[in-house]
């Protein structure tokens, strides 16, 4: 009886190991070069997972840009074969403003999706090595380059840019040669207060320009919050 019991246990253990190996291989294969349908399915799942948070987002008004903070609540990061992250950015008054969900596909290169939304708009970032394709409410907005330029998705002409410099504490956001906002650059090693504003200033902008500012700002804030494969800070998209 004892030998039979040990035999059964051995078989079960081997079966469990085999299943784990097959499952890991399946996860790697299906998340290595995901097609458009796979990505869209993942986005739908990501939306569902953070729905309880999106339902609590406060109404977005023009002044919310001035009130946005770096405060990231409900932050969760999981690092396995497929890396994921999610959380909520708040205002300086702790009001939930932007909920987000992130998924990094298997591999050592940038191949990920970031979904973020305010109370009234959805932002989707398809992250690849050469550029980040960003859309708003399902409509293509542009391609964010490694140097912070946002190019028109069709003409590839410069639409807006965020100017990144190593020695400045404010990152200017420029639209059509007009500086419309200044995003603060957190100092490395210096903890941020939940009441610290993300912007030093925001000049009056139209709604279409606000989408450009917000698209660049969400990416600039969250690209350091999510588990992208990065060897050097300069390698950030």
Image (spheres, rainbow, N blue to C red):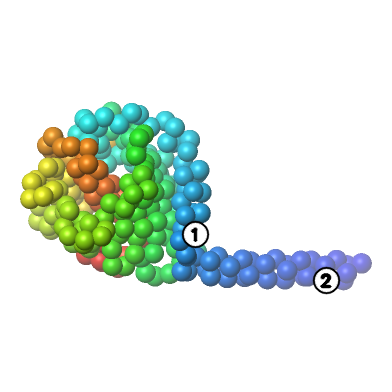
Relative image position of residue 167 (x, y in whole percent): 9, 56
Q: Nearer the viewer, residue 74 or 214?
A: 214
* Local secondary structure at mark 1: helix
Instruction: Report the side of 88 relative to 208 (left or right).
Output: right
Relative image position of residue 37 (x, y in whole percent): 49, 59
Above or below, comparing residue 5 to residue 179 in the picture: below
Please state, as top left, top right, bottom left or bottom right, where the C terminus lies in the image.
bottom left
Residue shown at the point (21%, 53%) measured from the top left: 188
The residue beneath circle 2 is: 7
* Local secondary structure at mark 2: helix
Residue shown at the point (50%, 43%) measured from the top left: 48
Label 1, label 2: how many angstroms apart (C-alpha)? 44 Å
Is the residue marked by circle 1 packed among few (<14), some (14-19), or many (20+) residues within 10 Å?
few
> Among all residues in the image, which is located at the extreme front?
155
How many labels sit on residues? 2
Above or below, comparing residue 89 to residue 28 in the picture: above
Is the residue marked by circle 2 packed among few (<14), some (14-19), or many (20+) residues within 10 Å?
few
User: Does residue 182 appear in this view?
Assistant: yes
Disc on res. 37:
1
Is there CB contact under 8 Å for labels 1 and 2? no
Q: Nearer the viewer, residue 71 or 135?
A: 135
Instruction: Report the side of 179 relative to 79 (left or right).
Output: left
Quarter-of-image position of residue 5: bottom right
User: Does residue 78 appear in this view?
Assistant: no
């Amino acid at each position: 009886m004892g030998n039979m019991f040990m035999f059964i246990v051995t078989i079960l253990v081997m079966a469990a190991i085999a299943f784990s190996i097959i499952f890991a291989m399946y996860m790697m294969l299906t998340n290595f070069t995901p097609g458009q349908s796979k990505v869209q399915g993942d986005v739908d799942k990501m939306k569902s997972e953070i729905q309880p948070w999106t339902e609590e987002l406060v109404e977005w008004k023009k002044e919310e840009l001035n009130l946005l903070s770096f405060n990231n609540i409900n932050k969760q990061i999981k690092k396995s074969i497929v890396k994921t992250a999610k959380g909520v950015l708040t205002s300086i008054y702790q009001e939930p403003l932007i909920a987000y969900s992130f998924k990094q596909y298997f591999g050592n290169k940038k191949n990920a999706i970031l979904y973020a939304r305010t109370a009234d708009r959805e932002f989707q970032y398809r992250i690849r090595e050469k550029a980040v394709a960003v859309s708003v409410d399902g409509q293509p907005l542009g391609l964010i380059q490694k140097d912070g330029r946002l190019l028109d998705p069709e003409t590839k002409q410069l639409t807006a840019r965020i100017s990144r410099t190593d020695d400045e504490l404010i990152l200017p956001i420029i639209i059509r040669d007009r500086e419309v906002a200044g995003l603060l650059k957190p100092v490395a090693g210096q903890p941020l207060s939940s009441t610290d504003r993300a912007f030093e200033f925001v000049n009056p902008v139209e709604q279409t320009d606000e989408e450009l500012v917000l698209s660049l700002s969400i990416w600039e804030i969250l690209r350091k919050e999510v588990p992208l494969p990065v060897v050097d800070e300069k390698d950030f998209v």
